[in-house]
Amino acid sequence: LMQDVLSGSTAIKVNVWEDAIGGRVRALRAREASSIAHSLTLLAALEAFIFFAPGFAAFLALTADHYVSGLGDGEVKLEDAYTTLALFSILVKQLNVFPRAIKAFDESK
């Protein structure tokens, strides 16, 4: 009889703590979900920036070259345009690694 009473009291003690531990677990899961959402938002912003930035930078470089060349003949030379676009194409390939590095750094925390 005493054995049944002791095992029953253990079951009651476990059930009493269930709500408190469940609340802690839910709070930790909410923090984890928030952290994951923040990381994914940052990664999406980096991907969008890396997709958009090289084309925009090439546009700015060629526009600046046009206006600086405007002091002379006002034309952008074909060789300069192709070289600029080739360099920005290389930049795109290099920058594609950057979000992966940021993600790996963030996940290592």
Image: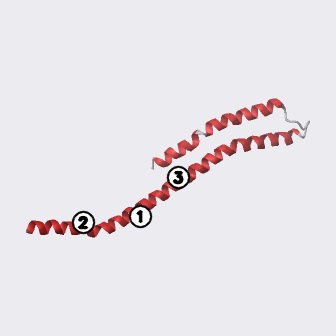
In three-dimensional space, the C-alpha distance between marks 3 and 2, rounded to whole angstroms, equals 36 Å
- The picture places residue 76, in percent across and down from the top left corner, at 85, 35
Question: Mark 3: which amino acid?
Answer: Ser
Tag 3: Cα neighbours inside 10 Å, few (<14), some, or many (≥20)? some
Q: Residue furthest right?
A: 73
Question: Mark 1: which amino acid?
Answer: Ala
- Secondary structure beneath dot 1 equals helix
| Residue depicted at 65% across the width and 38% down the height | 92
Contact, mark 3 vs mark 1 (Cβ under 8 Å): no
Q: Nearer the viewer, mark 1 or mark 2?
A: 2
Along the viewing direction, whichever of 77 and 50 lies nearer the viewer: 50
Please name the residue that numbered disc 2 is placed on.
14
- The picture places residue 84, in percent across and down from the top left corner, at 75, 35
Question: Mark 2: which amino acid?
Answer: Val
Along the viewing direction, whichever of 77 and 19 lies nearer the viewer: 19
Tag 2: Cα neighbours inside 10 Å, few (<14), some, or many (≥20)? few
- The picture places residue 108, in percent across and down from the top left corner, at 45, 47
| Residue depicted at 35% across the width and 65% down the height | 22
Please name the residue that numbered disc 3 is placed on.
39
* Mark nearer the N terminus (3 vs 2): 2
Please name the residue that numbered disc 1 is placed on.
27
- The picture places residue 31, in percent across and down from the top left corner, at 45, 60
In three-dimensional space, the C-alpha distance between marks 3 and 1, rounded to whole angstroms, equals 18 Å
